Structure formats: structure tokens, C-alpha cells
Image (cartoon, rainbow, N blue to C red):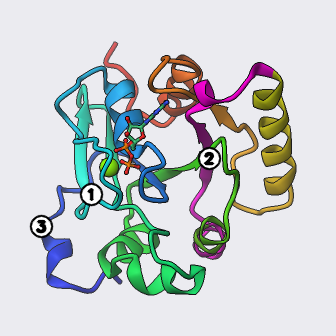
Amino acid sequence: MMGGVSMTALPDTALPEVAFAGRSNVGKSSLVNALTGRKTLARSSGEPGRTRELNFFDLGGRLRLVDLPGYGFAKAPKDVAQRWTALTRDYLRGRVNLKRVVLLIDARHGIKASDVEVMDVLDKSAVVYQIALTKLDKLKPSEQAAIVTATQEKIRKRPAAFPAVAATSSAKRLGLDALRADLADLAVPEPM
Ligand SMILES: Nc1nc2c(ncn2[C@@H]2O[C@H](COP(=O)(O)OP(=O)(O)O)[C@@H](O)[C@H]2O)c(=O)[nH]1
Ligand SMILES: [Mg+2]
């Protein structure tokens, strides 16, 4: 059940959806913009915690990308669950057309306690989530390989984790085609 008046304002559930989640400032809006190839869709800014609502982007009538509010901007990791809006949690737990969550992790910082809390929620809800490392351009190539391997190892035993970790840079447009290909499998098939 999805409680709350605000859920009624969401678009209908006819299209499959992929939601982008992650700590504030991890690069969610930038990645959604890079994937859609449009600069004006999701607003991206250097101001942490800027995105406060759910923003929906229709991709050719076949897939919808959802830019979720960020979490983890609280001082203590324990605050995360409370601070992350109830709307977001309702959405993740109860959205019938939610096919996957792309969980963004800053490649410089790796998986944090607040990310683990979100993965726990998703594992319990059986929502498949795919890790996308962001801002790879900030690391040297050797460091890039190391964080990909370390992240893969950390999610290996998690029940709902998608096995392939995406390694991306929105700024340098790295890893976007590979992630797009992973997500294309979830889209409504193109008409013949
Ligand atoms: N170097 C670098 N900076 C990035 C990248 N993606 C996002 N940023 C920067 O990180 C900050 C937060 O990005 P934003 O997309 O607004 O994050 P959000 O809060 O998760 O939506 C902004 O200053 C972006 O310019 C990237 O791939 N490389
Ligand atoms: Mg944002």
C-alpha cells in the first residue's frame, strides 16, 4: 500500500520506471541528464540536497527515469531513514512499475553507512538495484579499477543487487552507453 496524498500526484504506472537514488551531491541529476542527453531536464547544482521531489523523465514513451531526492546529508548516518522523505520510501517499496533502482555511489568515497541502509531497504523489498559509481573522472585509472572491484565484492552477497557495477562519469561521458544498454532491457519493446 502506498499511503499519503502526494502519491496520487505521480504519473500513471503504464511505463516501466528506473529510479536514481543516492546521497545528496553524488551526481544523480547529472547522470539522469547525461543519459537523457538533455541539459534542462533534471536540475543539477552544487548545492547539496537540492532535489526535494520526485522528478520523472519520459524516454521516448518506452521507459521513465525518476530522479529521487538525495539522502545522507544528515550529520549522523542514523538520521538517514528519518530524513529521507516518506514519499521516497513509499515510492521504492510500493511502486508497481518500478523495474530497477540505480544506486549512485561517489567513486571517491565508496559505499557509506547511509547507502547500506538503503540497500537493506531494497533487499527487503526485493527491488533490484544496480550500483553506478559516479565521478570516475576524479580518480586515476588504477584507482578506478580498484573501486570497481571493491564495490563488486561488497555487493556480491546482497540478494537484490544487480551483479554488474556501472562505472560512470557524467562530466567526461564515461560508462553511459553500457548503463543505457543495461537499462534498455527494461524498456517497453520498440514497435515493429
Ligand atoms: N567531476 C565530476 N563532477 C560531477 C559529475 N557528476 C556530477 N558532478 C558534480 O557534482 C555536483 C552534484 O551533482 P548533482 O547532479 O547535482 O548531484 P545530485 O545532488 O545527486 O543530483 C555538481 O557540482 C556536479 O557538477 C562527474 O561525473 N564528474
Ligand atoms: Mg539532484
Identity of the residue drawn at 35% across and 83% down: 1
- Could you tell me which quadrant the C terminus lies in? top left
Question: 100 and 145: which one is in front?
Answer: 145
Identity of the residue drawn at 24% across and 23% down: 38
Question: Vertical placement of 122 versus 50: above or below?
Answer: below
Which numbered disc, 2 or 3, marks the residue that appears first in the sequence?
Answer: 3
Q: Is residue 18 magenta?
A: no
The secondary element bearing badge 3 is classed as: helix
Q: Which residue is mark 3?
A: 9
- Outermost residue toward the top? 192
Quarter location, residue 3:
bottom left
Specify the amino acid type for callout 1: Arg
Question: Vertical placement of 62 versus 117: above or below?
Answer: above
Label 2: few (<14), some or many (≥20) within 10 Å?
many
Quarter location, residue 118:
bottom right
Quarter location, residue 48:
bottom left
List x then y, in percent, for residue 41: 19, 35
Q: Which residue is mark 2?
A: 130
Q: Which residue is mark 1?
A: 50
List x then y, in percent, for residue 122: 59, 68
Q: Nearer the viewer, mark 2 or mark 3?
A: 2
Identity of the residue drawn at 39% across and 63% down: 96
